[in-house]
Image: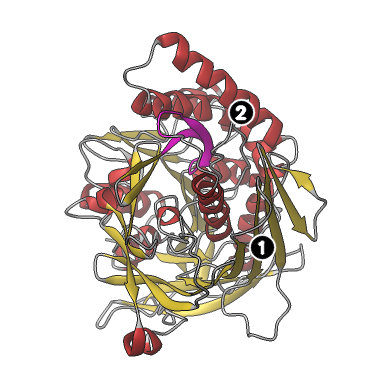
Amino acid sequence: MIFLPFRRPLATPVRLTLAVLLLLLLGAGLLAAQTSAPRTDRFTLLYLAANDTVGVERIERTDSVLTGDLTVRGQPRIRWTERLHEPAGVHTLYIDAWRPGASPTETPLQQLLLQVRRDSAYVYTAPAANAALGAPMATLPARANARWLVNQSLAHAAWLTGRSVGDTAWFVFSAGASLQPGVLSRQGDSVTLTLAGLRSIFRFADDGALLGVAVPSQGLRGVVVRGDAAARISTTPDAPVSYDAPAAAPYTATNVRVPTPMGHTLAGTLTRPRSATARVPVVVTITGSGAQDRDESIPSVEGYRLFRQVADTLGRRGIAVLRLDDRGVGESGGNHATATSRDFANDVRAAVAWLRTRDDIDPDRIALVGHSEGGLIAPLVAADDARLAGIVLLAGPAYTGARIVAFQQRSAIAQLNRTGTAASRDSMFMEAQRQLESSARGNAWMREFLQYDPLPTAKRVRTPILVLQGETDQQVTPEQADTLAAAFRTGGNRNITVHRLSDTNHLFQRDTSGVPAGYGTLADRRVSAEALGLLADWLVGTLRVPR
């Protein structure tokens, strides 16, 4: 996600799932005041979702340099340096990125340099070719963290140069693979950054010291901690994630390693009913876009664990579940940043092949459950594997990525530019489209996503299919469920079941509005019982589970 507070809006692609969390990072680097007296200031920023710590950032500030060491749950570690007093019109940010859990002695996976020179911005990455902003950065492993550091540094550059950008909309790259508009404005001691209708507010003391950060609609905040209390805060907030079965659960949970023909190993958890005395049916879960762990958790949406809930529900109904960290995520090997949807489909094929070698799994009762992009990947696998017993698509797309992105762009522009003319909104949309096309040329995942049409593949799928879709989904619009079903039937498949769930969003939460910015503020942030019940009932019947 990149925000360019200058004359020319540019954008850089990245596959994200933590769009809200982006609005917290590097609060310390934003708008640091210049002072005449030399000084060194050290403090810690504690990033909280409700009362849950999601990130810790150690900051050291001098007259000329800001440095930080940032750890966010589930994200690579970032160390950054920002130069504050360079020649007029020049502003520089350096970023080093390590894999999650890396030791201090490891070499960074990648390094990034951002330099703003008057009205232009340039990003250089290693090991990748230097590129003007807007060219590929897809190999950067730091994902959300580094993109937001760049974003905030550009905003900081605008402040230090005295530019006024409060009434101007600029294009940024945001979650869901869409270019969206943003606005930076100042009011008294506060700076507000609004991206696609989501406000992030930074408060400062008279001397420029940061007092706090807040994203009101998400219940997220950044708290400044100093002195002994800061020293006691761990710089590694990640507690080891437990994938064990709950106490007294009627199923076991075993951590497994799945080899792939591509050379990397996928880490996951296999849950299996305790009472099983013979081979059991199994479901393989497929995550949505972005670097996802096996639960498809979203740190900014407290308590949301889609596939953990699926595994628990199905485990109690006699069905095993294999859920996997994406390649390059968590404990899985491989490179997530360079992979496309077809590459992820190959990972799923490897998981299915591995399950068929096990003597506790019925090789003819294997089904796939895919969410969002996972709902695009599941038909890719099923079209070439008639042995699969069924597939479930949770908010699976029926349109090309280009069409989906266009909808998201227009929706975001309409939210931000409510008082503008239709002509001004059209102009913003055309610019967003131009920048997206330019960016996609250097990003393999984005290029494939924009061009891929799911319907020809759907016509080749012969396995039984369940399509679940939320009626308030504003990421994959609800009519796409019917479009998919029609394509399956056109290909000759008559075993199609469709359920469109009222007041249900893209995450299958109960939600009357479906606005992504509101996911984390819902009273109940878990997957709805209705969605889980429909899923389980269909799979029990399709996989012939004894009742």
Magenta span: chief secondary structure: strand
Mark linked to residue 276: none
Q: Nearer the viewer, residue 475 or 63?
A: 63
Q: Is residue 205 visible in the rendered structure shown here?
A: yes
Q: Indicate whether 385 appears above or below 85.
A: above
At label 2, which amino acid type do we have? Answer: Asp
Give the SS element for disc 1.
strand
- In magenta segment, residue 170: yes
- In magenta segment, residue 346: no
Tell me the magenta residue range. Answer: 166-184
Q: Indicate whether 155 appears above or below 273.
A: above
Residue count near mark 1 (Cα–Cα under 10 Å), binned few <14, some 14–19, many ≥20: many
**Residue at the image position 59 percent from the left and 68 percent from the top:** 65
Q: Indicate whether 133 appears above or below 37.
A: above
Give how far across and how far down residue 308 sits, in percent. Answer: 37, 65
**Residue at the image position 45 percent from the left and 79 percent from the top:** 42
Q: Is residue 484 visible in the rendered structure shown here?
A: no
Q: Is residue 246 left or right of residue 285?
A: left
Question: Dot 2 corresponds to which residue?
Answer: 453
Question: Dot 1 corresponds to which residue?
Answer: 94
Give how far across and how far down residue 59 sits, in percent. Answer: 48, 74
